[in-house]
Amino acid sequence: MKKIALLGSCALLAATASTSFAGEYYPANHWRCSADQLYGHPSYQASYPEQRQGYGRTTWARDAYKYYRYGAGNNLFLATKFWKSWMDDEVEAAAAPAYDLDIYPVYADDNNATTGIWKGPGPQSTATWYGTTFSIIKSRPWSLPKADGSVYADALCEAGCYSPEQEVRFGDGFMPVAEAFEVGEQHVTTLTPQATLGALSFMDNDIARWTVDIAPADQAILTIRMQSGGELRVTAEHPVLTSEGVMKKASDLVVGESLVREDGSPDPIMSTERKMVFTKVYNLRPTTTDLLSNILVAQGYLNGSVRYQSEYLKYLNRRLMRSNVPMDVIPRTGATSAQRQPPTSAPIAPIAPLQTAPSPRRR
């Protein structure tokens, strides 16, 4: 079956059966669907059930599968164009209270040379398939736009991260993240599991897989400018490490807080700017699964891999690293106590690595 040319190295993005480790959610999908973005969370069910747009798409697809598989001539071929059985475990795992995610299927269209996707029912779809609430989306007719077999359920959706020109450290040098993806870079530099803010140490880490937008789209990009003149451009949900050892969403950062440079020194934020940009964004997963070795270096600053956006959500806004840096030397000018969320002092239990993961190479 033909894959979408826009995605480049598609072997890195292929959906696989569910894998779990240490009780953590490990999604089988590797597309970020900003081009077809639906919203809502399982926790909305009690008070805002109609706002679960993504769950509406999932319910629509599951119902179509059941109808064509069991109620209309036992047509398994047609049924699996709407939903695939491996998706069930992924959706249920993501909906657990620890993650609170509504993930949903996205549809490939091998004959669409512009985007390579078909937008099923939801807010950013065509007028025929338009829907803004759970009830409307799930109640759309079960039909696909083409009968030639070019449209099919292909993956689920998750978060993404760096704008394409942002330079990430691979080995001893930096490379724009989009270029690294296109050339099939297999190794990335991360912190070691023993690193602290007072004693940073790095290693070469194998890349388990990349995450990339399924197609370019208008999306909010934050430009964070620091006192040193440094700059970082990421999506609003991207995890960034502060000088207090706390991993925060980029949208939660405020002027006066400091990011951490790769030499461990704090660099105060001077300004943040949000702008809509038509682009694709990128991130990756190292093979290792502990918290610290999922911290990368981008534009010279420490920030999180895609695991913090899809698997490690509960660790955001918590202290990740013990530091020898005295708290009274950390720049805080401009950030009020109300704007900052104090980190907890409780240590975080380590996450066991996958038994099949190859050992990363220290540098």
Image (cartoon, rainbow, N blue to C red):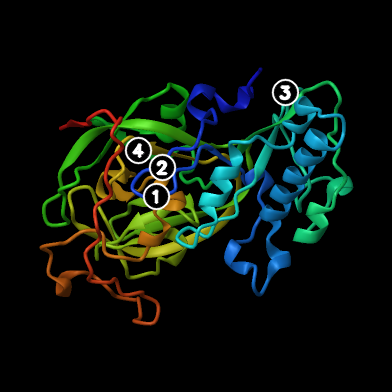
**Residue 298 picture quarter:** top left
Q: Position of residue 138 (x, y in %)?
A: 79, 53
What residue do we see at 21% from left, 64% from top?
347
**Residue 133 picture quarter:** bottom right
Q: Position of residue 251 (x, y in %)?
A: 47, 63
Asked if the residues shown at circle 1 and circle 3 are in contact, with their CB atoms under 8 angstroms apart, the answer is no
Q: Most extreme residue toward the top, as rendered?
A: 1
Mark with earlier residue (2, 3): 2
Q: Nearer the viewer, mark 1 or mark 4?
A: 1
Q: Look at mark 4 in the image and give the residue it sits on.
A: 168
In the drawing, does residue 141 fall left or right of residue 296?
Answer: right
Q: Look at mark 1 in the image and give the residue it sits on.
A: 24
In the drawing, does residue 106 fall left or right of residue 75?
Answer: left
Q: For numbered disc 1, what is the local secondary structure?
A: loop
Q: Look at mark 2 in the image and give the residue it sits on.
A: 20
- How far apart marks 4 and 3 lie (CA) works out to 32 Å
Q: Nearer the viewer, mark 1 or mark 3?
A: 1
What residue do we see at 29% from left, 71% from top?
343
Mark with earlier residue (4, 3): 3
Q: Look at mark 3 in the image and give the residue it sits on.
A: 110
How crowded pointer 3 is (Cα within 10 Å; few <14, some 14-19, many 20+) is rated as some
Asked if the residues shown at circle 1 and circle 2 are in contact, with their CB atoms under 8 angstroms apart, the answer is yes
